[in-house]
Image (spheres, grey):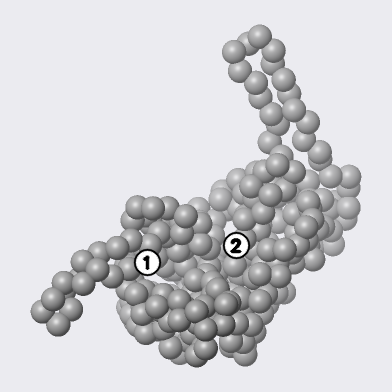
């Protein structure tokens, strides 16, 4: 189906879910809203991708201390999510093949490093993850990246897509949702706009060591889990240190295991040393 046909169908009046109540039946039911149907369509398409995952624990004691020192000196709290995005951007520069995707019989390598970050929003009483695209992160500092994320979090709008100027997305008929997701996954314009790298921090609210195995269309998807405390042997003495649970997911069509392992090693070192955190 052509893009023009999709846009024509997208102009139709959007479906507005209405509750379906069953009284005195021992239950009640509510029709699926657009946001949930979009998630289902995305999961249905992306589960067919050839993806492999790497689970890691990364010592973040040093960067957390640097963040605390920065806060003590400036009064500005630094975001761990923004820090992970900055580290990913730096490491990707040395692994440009990961900033790519396949469409048809071609490898497409993106010039800019654009990273999508999932933000949880409250839309019509429903918690919905929505991505924002941090464009050209190779030219931005940690503070620049954090400012964009903070600005997006303050936007008050009840329409999905308002963070990225894609409100038309909610006009796509339900029966075309999977088709749209498949086409968008291989579309160069969409890749340039939203990138093929993604970060989500859904697990940072957990108190126990937790990793998540995500789904997504990114070539590299970092899913940030919880922060746990572990006793580690340092200079013949045990020290209590903070560790971040993180899952790195890779599109196996684009990258193999050995390059992915080298990427993970460099990413872990970059996160651990905290050097991207500015001096107060």
Image coordinates of residue 75 in percent, x first then y, are: 57, 77
Q: Nearer the viewer, residue 10 or 54?
A: 54
* Picture layout, residue 224 above or below residue 106: above
Disc sitting over residue 31 in the figure: none
Who comes first in sequence, dot 2 or dot 1?
Answer: 2
Q: Is there a contact, CB below 8 Å, between mark 2 and mark 1?
A: no
Q: Give the quadrant of the N terminus.
A: bottom right
Q: Nearer the viewer, residue 95 or 243?
A: 243
Badge 1 density bin: few <14, some 14–19, many ≥20, Cα 10 Å: many
Image coordinates of residue 242 in percent, x first then y, are: 32, 68
What secondary structure is marked by label 1? strand
Tag nearer the camera, 2 or 1: 1
Query: Within the image, what quadrant is residue 269 found in?
Result: bottom left
Q: Nearer the viewer, residue 105 or 274?
A: 274
Q: Residue at x 72, y 20 (%)?
A: 21
Q: Is residue 38 visible?
A: no
Distance between mark 2 and mark 1 Cα atoms: 18 Å
Q: Residue at x 70, y 42 (%)?
A: 125
Q: Which residue is mark 2?
A: 118
Q: In the picture provided, is 73 more to the left or to the right than 207?
A: right
Image coordinates of residue 118 in percent, x first then y, are: 60, 62
Query: Within the image, what quadrant is residue 99 found in?
Result: bottom right
Q: Residue at x 73, y 23 (%)?
A: 20
Q: Residue at x 78, y 31 (%)?
A: 18
Q: Which residue is mark 1?
A: 244
Q: Is residue 121 visible?
A: yes
What secondary structure is marked by label 2? strand
Q: In the picture provided, is 23 more to the left or to the right than 196?
A: right
Give the residue furthest to the top. Answer: 24
Image coordinates of residue 259 in percent, x first then y, are: 37, 80
């Amino acid at each position: 189906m052509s893009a023009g046909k999709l846009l024509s169908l997208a102009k139709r009046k959007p479906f507005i879910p209405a509750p379906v109540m069953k009284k005195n039946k021992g239950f009640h039911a509510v029709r699926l809203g657009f946001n949930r149907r979009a998630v289902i369509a995305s999961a249905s398409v992306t589960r067919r991708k050839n993806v492999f995952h790497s689970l890691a624990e990364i010592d973040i004691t040093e960067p957390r201390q640097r963040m605390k020192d920065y806060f003590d000196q400036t009064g500005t709290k630094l975001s761990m999510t923004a820090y992970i995005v900055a580290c990913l951007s730096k490491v990707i520069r040395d692994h440009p093949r990961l900033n790519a995707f396949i469409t048809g019989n071609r490898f497409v390598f993106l010039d800019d490093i654009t990273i999508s970050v999932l933000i949880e929003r409250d839309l019509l009483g429903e918690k919905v993850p929505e991505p924002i695209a941090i464009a050209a992160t190779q030219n931005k500092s940690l503070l620049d990246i954090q400012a964009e994320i903070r600005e997006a979090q303050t936007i008050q709008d009840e329409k999905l897509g308002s963070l990225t100027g894609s409100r038309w997305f909610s006009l796509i008929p339900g029966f075309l949702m999977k088709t749209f997701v498949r086409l968008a996954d291989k579309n160069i314009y969409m890749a340039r706009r939203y990138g093929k790298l993604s970060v989500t921090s859904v697990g940072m609210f957990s108190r126990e060591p937790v990793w998540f195995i995500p789904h997504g269309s990114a070539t590299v998807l970092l899913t940030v889990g919880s922060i746990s405390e572990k006793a580690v042997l340092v200079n013949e003495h045990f020290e209590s240190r903070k560790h971040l649970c993180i899952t790195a997911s890779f599109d196996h069509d684009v990258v193999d295991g050995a390059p992915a392992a080298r990427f993970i090693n460099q990413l872990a070192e970059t996160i651990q040393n905290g050097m991207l955190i500015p001096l107060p």
